[in-house]
Amino acid sequence: MPKKISLFMIRLLVLLNLFYVAIFFKFAGAPFSIEACNKMSNAVHGLVSQPVFRIGSGSIERLGAILFLIPRTARLGAAIIAVFMVGALLSHIFVLGYGWFFVDALATFALPCLYLFLTRKRSDNPLSGVASTAQTN
């Protein structure tokens, strides 16, 4: 029972974080969100515009959060969030710099990874993937 509660809490924390960031910062056009997406646009020499970075990343975050909320698709949502957060972490490391948003992205990366680890499939046989060297005659 404690495992189910901890898995639910992980899903809830990630969901609230991603929806909060997407709705109140990215979709609402908060000034620092626009500034960060301008920096990202400048980093790729204007190939992707600021609104595409802002709205696109908010949409991917919402999609991952919705998939992570539904128990049947939670592992897929966790994988999408983890992969997306790798990009967010790299953008903070190379373009945006460190700060509270970097820490937030790091936590938002770590929690779905923890969820994936805790919900992995285990086999009963520890050598199930390894060919046995002993032969029975």
Image (spheres, rainbow, N blue to C red):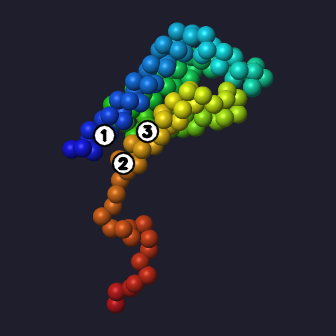
Name the residue beneath numbered marker 3: 111
**Rendered image quadrant of residue 7:** top left
Left or right of 101 on screen, residue 7: left
Q: Identity of the amino acid at label 2?
A: Leu
Circle nearer the N terminus (1, 2): 1
Circle nearer the N terminus (3, 2): 3
In the image, residue 95 above or below residue 48: below
Please tell me which residue is depicted at 26% across the width and 38% down the height of the picture. Answer: 5
In the image, residue 62 above or below residue 6: above
Residue 132 x %, y %: 41, 77
Q: Identity of the amino acid at label 3?
A: Leu
Q: Residues within 10 Å of mark 2 (few under 14, many from 20)?
A: few
In the image, residue 116 above or below residue 23: below
Marking on residue 118? 2
Left or right of 110 on screen, residue 120: left
Marking on residue 6? 1
Please tell me which residue is depicted at 69% across the width and 17% down the height of the picture. Answer: 38
Q: Is residue 80 visible?
A: no
Quarter of the figure with the N terminus: top left
Please tell me which residue is depicted at 48% across the width and 13% down the height of the picture. Answer: 24
**Rendered image quadrant of residue 42:** top right
Quarter of the figure with the C terminus: bottom left
